[in-house]
Amino acid sequence: MNVLRKEVFTSFDGTELTLHRMGEGRPLLLLHGLFSSAQMNWIKWGHAERIAALGYEVLMLDFRVHGDSGAPHDPAKYPVNVLVRDVAALVDHLGLDDYDLSGFSLGARTALHGVSHGVLTPARLVIGGMGTAGLGEWEKRSVFFKRVIDEFDTIPRGDPAWYSVQFLRSQKVDRIAARLLLDTMPDLDLALLSHVTIPTLVVCGDEDNDNGSAEDLAELLPDATYVAVPGTHMGSVTKPELGQAIAHWLGAAN
C-alpha cells in the first residue's frame, strides 16, 4: 500500500498550504473541487492510491481556504486567479519540469486557466466535472455560492442551496475566507482553450450538468478525449469509475 505523506509549504504571498503526497515516480498534480479537499476528492475514495500504483507520485494540494491549508482573512491575500498562482508556486517549490496535471471541478477550471494562459505547462491534462458554462459563465455560478455563504444560517431545508450549506458545514469551511476567494475567479474566454494543445482527458459524470456541457468543452480543446462515468457532480467523485477512467487514460508511468 502506498504511504500517504503530508507537508506544508509557503506560497507566493506567505500563506501556508498543505500538500499530500502518495507513491513514487512520475509527478501528477491532483487539484480538488470547491469547498472540498484532497482528502475528500482524491484520497477517501481510493483514486489517488489507484493512480499511484501505476508508478506516479500523486501530489495533492489543499487549496487555500480548503482542507488543512491556511484561510487568511486579509483581502490582500486574494488577488485575481490566486489559486493558479498557488499551483504555480507549488510547481516551483517542487522544482517540477515534466509533470501531468489533473483537476476536478474548481481544480479543473484552475488547471485550464493556468494552462490556457501559459502559467502552467504540464505534459498532459485531466479535466473532471467541468463544462463550458463552468468556465465561461462562472460569474453566474458564483452568485449561488455567495448566497450560500451570505444566508448560511437562514436557508431552509428544501431550498436548492440547503445541501451546499450542509456540505460547507461538514467541511468546516471558513466562510469569511471563502467569500473573499469567490471574488478571485474570473470567467475564462473560451477562445483561449485553443492554446491547450496538450493531450487532455475530459471526464464527467453522466448525470453531471452543474457546469454545463463537458462534451462541448472537449470539442473546444485541440487534443481531447471525452469519457463519461456514472454519477452526478457530487456523486461521480465518490465512485471508483472516476479514478479508473483517469488511471486508464494516463496508463503506467514510464
Image (spheres, rainbow, N blue to C red):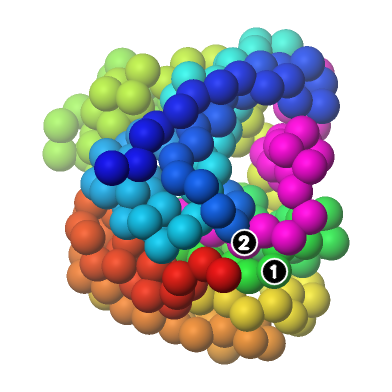
Residue 62 vertical placement versus 226 (above, below) = above
> Residue 11: x, y in percent?
75, 25
| Amino acid type indicated by mark 1 | Ala
> Residue 92: x, y in percent?
80, 40
Which residues, given as a range, are shown in magenta? 75-104
| Residue designated by label 1 | 123
For the residues bearing labels 1 and 2, Cβ distance under 8 angstroms: yes
Which element is circle 2 on?
strand
- Badge 1 density bin: few <14, some 14–19, many ≥20, Cα 10 Å: some
Assess whether residue 140 is covered by the magenta stretch: no
| Amino acid type indicated by mark 2 | Asp
Q: Is residue 131 visible?
A: no
Foreground residue among 252 and 15:
252
| Residue designated by label 2 | 100
Assess whether residue 95 is covered by the magenta stretch: yes
Quarter of the picture containing the N terminus is top left
